[in-house]
């Protein structure tokens, strides 16, 4: 008998149904809802989040977990139990009072930030932000104390909410290598690209043609529109549930590549979700492993497939059909135009090569901040110093385009940033195995065939859900844990050698 | 102190938040969701419906209602208490087992009906339908017993779920008058229209222009797109919550008036909802009064405003702009073309004059059916007999276009049909008062001005929520309870005299 395990399974499936409701109400809020719907919507979401939390922290779960540990379970069931326990512990280890206080402080800080950023008002921001940092440090300590064997530092406990299983020791090692190589590479690439005379892609690009083009790209990338949607929102994102994973992108009339890149990126996220194992539907063990792997899939779709020179060559005929004014530019010319490297103040505008330096900077600051080695008031100086060191740009006095540019810290989402670059590194590592396995990968991409990649990802990554820990999953799929070599190889091949 | 009343208020506000979630998940299911999302979606909605029911029938509510009755409440608070109690009693008086059984039988019957209707298979349908009728009769009895002072017959108890406050005695009286007059009027109108030589509106009408035209119509009808949306669905409907009321319509390439009529109709529903009193937000007393009044608003928008000859004359310039191929037809010619009367087998295709006969037929059958005076197997004969008598059409052996044409009975929604015609009657009665108050109403409509109608409806109907019983509300607004005279006057004016 495994009565307690069954009860837990049943509870987590109910939780998944509540989460489904929250997910799609939030999607609607960002994509469909008219402005005056916000009050009712926010109240409804808050109510559901409260019910979800109540169900997940109900006192009887303590006993169920105690007893389920002694029940006769298969090894897969044990994994499932472990993932349920992880989610339960995460929700129940932080006192409700602290959750509420952090949520309020975060809302206040984020709200103020929207104006303070525009006005370059670091001092105004700092007033609210100090409380967010203080409460986040408290949260980190509480989370660390709840599982001291797994978390070496308070920061690790926050990191684990997003990069589950990938700790700061691993990340620091990976980032150390990138820090050593990327600034040098950047100089080399900029020097070699200065001789390229790449064309700028300019003009007016009809929004409806862009939308159609993005849909065509999704179809080429294997997206099944009976299992999801493409819509438009202020910031591109991906969300959903089994059988219904939705992505958004955004369009600008003076530029069309950004919408396509975001579409490819979000299609990667949605494909991972749609490929998760049906048999673990609604349970934590059936979810995507962590954000570092999630981001590996989105970046694999965006950088390794869409931006691959052979795929882009194939796709250029769609671009020409959508925008006949570009017909004099070959796919290769466009590709050269959009793969230029240049250090930039703004993370979200950074190219593939310099992007990790933005992340490393943030990682180092938030790590020190949460562990109490850096005060919030010291952030601007630390930011400026690192920007100069890593990218050769000063942000002195320019908070707007410096430490005030991101939303992540305003509500205390510390530990999220590293997953972007871990994802890029994991994505390159995974794609390298696929390239090895399929020696003709360039010819395949050149005729628009990505099926072999999807099949491989489905069986080696997506179908695994959370059955393995992140590094074990990567080990099983690629033969080693996260290793920055392949990302660096990829950058050299694309930007120095201009191979693919 | 009014502690119990406050607790009840708090509970009903939470219920409204759950209902908000259910509402928008269902909207999304019908309007946005890709097909493979259905499994997760249905489970999530079922979970929320269950939580809603659990909260509404929680044992502690019994005490709260007991005690709140003795608390010192204002007369408005007493009304609010009464409406909360009504909702609570409705949910708690039917045993959970019966609810479940009816829901399952209804799903089975509706599912089978989709094929059986196509195949004209009454016998196959009857097998499932008998159980639906049996369980609906049980439900009706239980509901009647829970409030025997209010419900004279079991059918009245089901009727009250939709036509709250309008009982079968009232409805029978109103319908008796319509039955007497409408068949005679139909003959007279058809005779006089046979001499009209009305033009048929034919052609190909671009869907995107139709969409734009529907939006223009909504703006003319005072719809605020920051408080709602227009989308597309298989069957037009309206749904939403405070500040976010959404409607849908459907488009056909060979016809454009249908989409406009549905748009005007649903805009009426949405305007009622958006006009409900903000101070009673989330509480039963702040909801629309009943379906007979809801339908009065949608039909007032559709039939009394949009189809009014002067308004249509104004609107025809928008039609001409959208469809230049019609520029040789005057607004009046189009209006004559689309206001032709002809008896029809199908309710939803019926014109304004014959539509009530379809409803009266259904009302008489379902009333007898639920009260045990007619067996489900006798329906086809009763249907055929009444169709011959009321509209001069036989449905013998033609179940598809006879008693199998509607979805309403398949899941046991008995008591819904009368609201369509009560709505038409109430709508005409309300509009007659507005016409009296604004002697220049035709000139106003002729220049597209409907603001005076919206203002009147807002203060006399929408802002009242459920503070009054339906007939009291109508009495306060029009000086009398539901009276079919004004609907008959309207029909004569429009179809016989061709006035407006």
Image: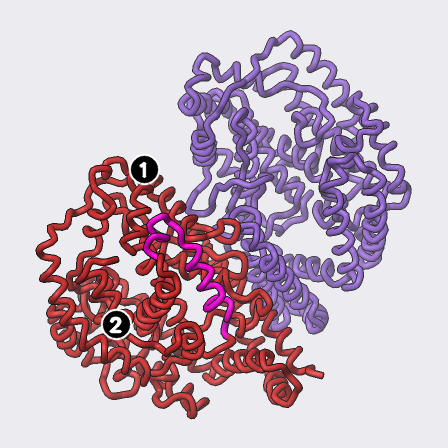
Chain colours: A red, B purple
The reply, left or right, for residue A67 in relation to residue A260 is right
Mark 2 and mark 1: Cα distance apart in space:
37 Å
What label sits on residue B242 in the rendered view? none
Whole-percent x and y of residue A337?
Answer: 19, 51
Please, which chain is the residue tagged with disc 1 on? A
Please, which chain is the residue tagged with disc 2 on? A
Residue for badge 2: A359
Q: Which residues are magenta?
A: A441-466
Magenta stretch containing residue A402, yes or no?
Answer: no
Q: Residue at x 18, y 81 (%)?
A: A378
The reply, left or right, for residue A128 in relation to residue B86 is left
Residue nearer the viewer, B243 or B31: B31
Q: Can residue B170 be spotted in the picture?
A: yes
Q: Residue at x 22, y 43 (%)?
A: A330
Whole-percent x and y of residue B39?
Answer: 61, 57
The reply, left or right, for residue B22 in relation to residue A116 is right
What label sits on residue A321 in the rendered view? 1
Which SS class for mark 1?
helix
Q: Can residue B152 be spotted in the picture?
A: no
Magenta stretch containing residue A461, yes or no?
Answer: yes
Residue A150, above or below A193: below
Closer to the chain start, of discs 2 and 1, is 1
Most common SS among magenta residues: helix
Quarter the C terminus of chain A occupies = bottom left
Residue B168, above or below B80: above
Whole-percent x and y of residue B160?
Answer: 74, 48
Residue B383, above or below B27: above
The reply, left or right, for residue B344 in relation to residue A350 is right
Contact between marks 2 and 1 (CB within 8 A): the answer is no
């Amino acid at each position: 008998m495994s009565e307690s395990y069954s009860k837990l399974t049943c509870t987590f499936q109910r939780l998944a149904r509540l989460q489904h409701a929250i997910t799609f109400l939030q999607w609607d809020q960002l994509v469909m809802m008219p402005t005056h719907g916000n009050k009712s919507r926010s109240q409804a979401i808050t109510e559901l989040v409260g019910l979800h939390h109540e169900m997940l922290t109900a006192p009887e779960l303590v006993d169920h977990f105690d007893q389920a540990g002694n029940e006769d379970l298969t090894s897969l069931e044990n994994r499932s139990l472990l993932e349920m326990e992880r989610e339960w512990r995460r929700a129940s280890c932080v006192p409700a009072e602290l959750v509420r206080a952090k949520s309020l402080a975060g809302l206040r800080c984020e709200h103020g930030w929207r104006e303070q950023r525009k006005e370059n008002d670091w001092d105004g921001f700092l007033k609210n932000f100090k409380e967010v940092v203080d409460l986040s440090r408290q949260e980190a300590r509480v989370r660390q104390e709840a599982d001291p064997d797994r978390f070496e530092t308070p920061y690790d406990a926050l990191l684990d909410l997003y990069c589950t299983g990938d700790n700061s020791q691993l990340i620091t090692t990976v980032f150390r290598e990138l820090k050593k190589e990327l600034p040098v590479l950047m100089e080399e690439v900029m020097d070699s690209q200065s001789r390229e005379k790449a064309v700028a892609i300019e003009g007016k690009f009809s929004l409806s043609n862009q939308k159609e083009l993005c849909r065509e790209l999704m179809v080429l990338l294997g997206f099944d529109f009976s299992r999801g949607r493409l819509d438009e929102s202020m910031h591109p994102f991906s969300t959903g549930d089994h059988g219904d994973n939705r992505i958004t992108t955004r369009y600008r009339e003076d530029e069309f590549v950004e919408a396509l890149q975001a579409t490819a990126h979000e299609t990667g996220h949605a494909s991972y979700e749609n490929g998760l194992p049906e048999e673990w539907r609604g349970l934590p063990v059936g979810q995507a492993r962590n954000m570092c792997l999630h981001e590996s899939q989105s970046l694999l779709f965006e950088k390794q497939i869409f931006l691959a020179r052979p795929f882009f060559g194939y796709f250029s005929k769609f671009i020409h059909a959508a925008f006949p004014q570009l017909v004099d530019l070959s796919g290769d010319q466009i590709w050269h135009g959009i793969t230029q490297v240049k250090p930039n103040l703004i993370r979200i505008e950074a190219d593939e090569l310099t992007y990790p330096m933005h992340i490393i900077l943030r990682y180092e600051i938030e790590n020190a901040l949460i562990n109490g080695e850096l005060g919030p008031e010291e952030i601007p100086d630390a930011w400026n110093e690192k920007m100069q060191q890593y990218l050769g740009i000063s942000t002195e006095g320019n908070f707007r385009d410096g430490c005030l540019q991101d939303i992540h810290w305003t509500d205390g989402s510390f530990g999220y940033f590293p997953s972007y670059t871990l994802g890029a590194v994991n994505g390159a590592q995974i794609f390298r195995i696929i390239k090895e396995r399929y020696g003709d990968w360039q010819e395949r991409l050149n005729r628009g065939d990505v099926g072999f990649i999807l099949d491989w990802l489905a069986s080696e990554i997506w179908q695994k859900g959370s059955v393995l820990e992140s590094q074990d999953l990567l080990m099983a799929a690629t033969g080693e844990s996260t290793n920055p070599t392949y990302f660096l190889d990829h950058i050299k091949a694309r930007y120095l050698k201009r191979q693919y």
